[in-house]
Amino acid sequence: MAELPQMMRAFGVTFLSMFRKVTTEQYPEEKVPTQERFHGKHQLNRHPDGLEKCVGCELCAWACPADAIYVEGASNEEGDRFSPGERYGRVYQINYLRCIGCGLCIEACPTRALTMTNEYELADNSRTKLIYEKEDLLAPIQPGMVQPPHSMIDDFVAQDYYDGKVTGASAEQFAEVELIKQKNQGI
C-alpha cells in the first residue's frame, strides 16, 4: 500500500469509512453520562450543619484567567453567621459567558468551598440568565442541615469545621432558626 499514489490511499480511507457503523448520540433525548472529572457548573459547598464553606477570600476571582468570577466578602456577626470563618462571601457571581471551564478557581480555593459538578446544560437565550448568583450556585440544604444564618455549634471553633469534626446541625441550631422564624412572622 506504500507504493500506491497518495490520492489512491486517500480514496481508500474514504471508501473504508463508508461501511463503518455511524455513532450518533441522540441528545437531548438520550443523555450520555459525563466522565467523572468533567468540568461543568460550579457549586458552592456547605458544612454538614448548613454553614457555607466560602470565607469570601476572593482567591477564586484572582485565579480566574477569564475574569468570570466576582466575590464580595463581608464580616460574620456572632449568632448571625453564614460561615464558620471571620468572613463569608456576601456576593458571589460567575459569568458563564466568560467562564472557560479551566478549573483554576477550584485549585485556588483554600476551603474546598468551590467545586464543579457534572451539569453541562448551561445554554440560555438571555445573556443575563448566564450570570449565576450565589443562590444559584449554593448546594441545597440536605437533611440534618439548618439554613444559615445561625451560630456555630457550641464549643466548636472554625478549625473544627475544616477538620471535619462537624457531622450535622445541633438541636440548639435548629431551635435558634425556629426562634428567628417566629420572630420574623410576629408570633
Image (tube, rainbow, N blue to C red):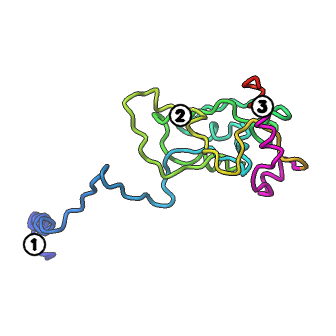
Task: State the CA–CA distance, disc 3 to disc 2.
Answer: 28 Å
Q: CA distance from mark 3 to mark 1?
A: 83 Å
Specify whether 60 is left or right of 27.
right
Of tags 3 and 1, which is closer to the observer? 3
Q: Position of residue 166 (x, y in %)?
A: 79, 54
Amino acid type at mark 3? Ile
| Element on which disc 1 rests | loop
Spot the residue most to the right. Answer: 155
| Residue on which the image places disc 2 | 132
Q: Is residue 166 magenta?
A: yes
Residue toward you, 149 or 159? 149
**Picture residue at 46% right of the left edge, 30% below the top:** 129
- At label 1, counting other C-alpha atoms closer than 10 Å, the crowd grade (few under 14, some 14-19, many 20 or more) is few
Location of the C terminus (image quadrant)? top right
User: Dot 2, crowdedness within 10 Å: few (<14), some or many (≥20)?
Assistant: some
What numbered label is drawn on residue 37?
Answer: none
Query: Which of the two discs, 3 and 2, labels the residue nearer the N terminus?
Result: 2
Question: Which span of residues is magenta-colored?
Answer: 156-179
> What's the residue at 79%, 56% (across, down)?
163
In the image, is residue 135 part of the stretch drawn in magenta? no
Label ID, residue 4? 1
Dot 3 surroundings within 10 Å: few (below 14), some, or many (20 or more)? few
Residue pushed farthest front? 187
